[in-house]
Image (cartoon, rainbow, N blue to C red):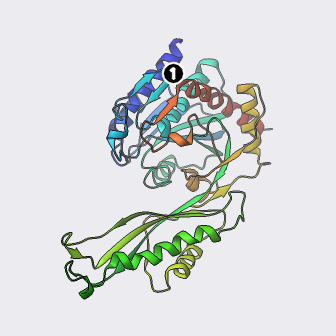
Amino acid sequence: MDKFENDCLKFLLKMVSTKSLSKNEKAVSQVVAKEMRKLKYDDVKIDKLGSVIGKIGNGRIKILFDAHIDTVGIADVKQWKTDPFKAVYKNGIIYGRGACDDKGCVASMIYAGNLIKKLGLLGDFTLYVSASVQEEIAEGYGINFLLKSLKFRPDCVVIGEPSSLKIVRGHKGRAEMKITVKGKSCHASIPDEGENAIYKTLPLIKGINDLNKKYKITSQLGKPVISVTQIETKNASINTIPDNCSFYIDRRTVENETKQEITDELKTACGKNIKIDYLKKFFNAWVLPKEHELVKSAINAYKKAYKKNTEAVLWPFCTNGSFTMGERKIPTIGFGPGEEKYAHVANEQICLKDVLAAVKFYSIFPLTFSSKKIQ
């Protein structure tokens, strides 16, 4: 392993070993900013939310690379073979929370910036590499704040998320909702005197589950998907029949589906009198056409990097692309090392060889895209 590869590995291990749950990214922001400065980025800043933005070049075409530095938490630490917040490197694999989602992408993008300077892969472009915050709890929030501080609209965005080194040209959107059912409390020894709110939710939950059987493929993104992901009550004790029960819904959308359509769908399934609370903003689905110049440039950069052909695919999950492309309509693609199946799970992992392979694509893409853009 040469110095460049070893330095990239050490940086990734340092990030993974720096705990950075959403809204608590300050420590890892400092790690990232320090590394960018060490790698001689032209300018490095940390915004008020904690996102780090590094700049290379001063050309006309503005390119934004974005990967997030926050991670999800740990459900059951006993399922982990190693300490999730202490990176382990073994047999070419990095283990730890955030290794795959999304610090492997962060490392690849930042070291690609260094390689661009080292190899003179500069052109009429300015590359901004952002390590953004709060993506796991609100896609788009951190990068929206960051873009406002930059005060310009990028010509394109590359979202770094695990894609098994495949180019991605779109993904499903997402809505998170909460439905609360009311009942009547009483002592658990006389349940007939009350009205159990948990039982009242059961037909509603079944109606939501049945929606998955009714969805049809109307998009390149496939069918919509809906799931009940959490149930809770607020109760005086376990000896009391609950007078309330809330359940949470994750709804994955395809292009052109609206918040009103989702609301109407749920009211049909659960009853028109239910109250639906949207927990976050509505994250839009998006698809970039195969013939779009950004997709073509990405495929061309891929050929240069890996000496083989490829086609752009679609992600099933949601990213900051729901803001950059889904909302702002800034041409966006996705690309990153790591496999989706290792995100958000115990024993999260990523192969170092894939991280280093991603550096190649990220380093070649800006000049490829900007050269095509100015023709």
Evaluate whether residue 299 shows in this view. Answer: yes
Residue 213 placed where, x, y %? 62, 68
Residue 55, compared with residue 270, is above or below; it is above
Residue at image x 45%, y 43%? Answer: 345
Point out residue 124 in the picture as x, y percentages from the top left corner. 68, 33
Spot occupied by residue 274 in the image (x, y as percentages of width and height)? 44, 82
Q: Can residue 38 be seen in this view?
A: no
Given residues 226 and 107, the one toward you in this image is 226
| Left or right of residue 20: residue 226 | right
Where's the C terminus, which quadrant? Answer: top right
Question: For the point 55% across and 28% down, which residue is it?
Answer: 355
Q: Tell me: residue 213, above or below residue 363.
A: below
Q: In this view, does 362 lie above or below 46?
A: above
Q: Which residue is drawn at 40% across and 37% down?
A: 97
Q: Choose top left, top right, bottom left or bottom right for residue 210.
A: bottom right
Crowding at dot 1, Cα within 10 Å, few <14 / some 14-19 / many 20+, comes out as few
Which amino acid type corresponds to the residue marked 1 in the rendered image?
Gly
Name the side, left or right, on which 137 lies relative to 239.
Answer: right
- Percent position of residue 323, x then y: 56, 55
> Mark 1 sits on what residue?
92
Front-most of residues 191 and 358 = 191
Q: In which quarter of the image is residue 34?
A: top left
Q: What element carries label 1?
A: loop
Q: How many marks?
A: 1
Q: Residue at the location (36% across, 46% down)?
A: 73
Name the residue nearer the viewer: 374 or 218.
218
| Residue farthest toward the front in the current orientation of the protein | 189
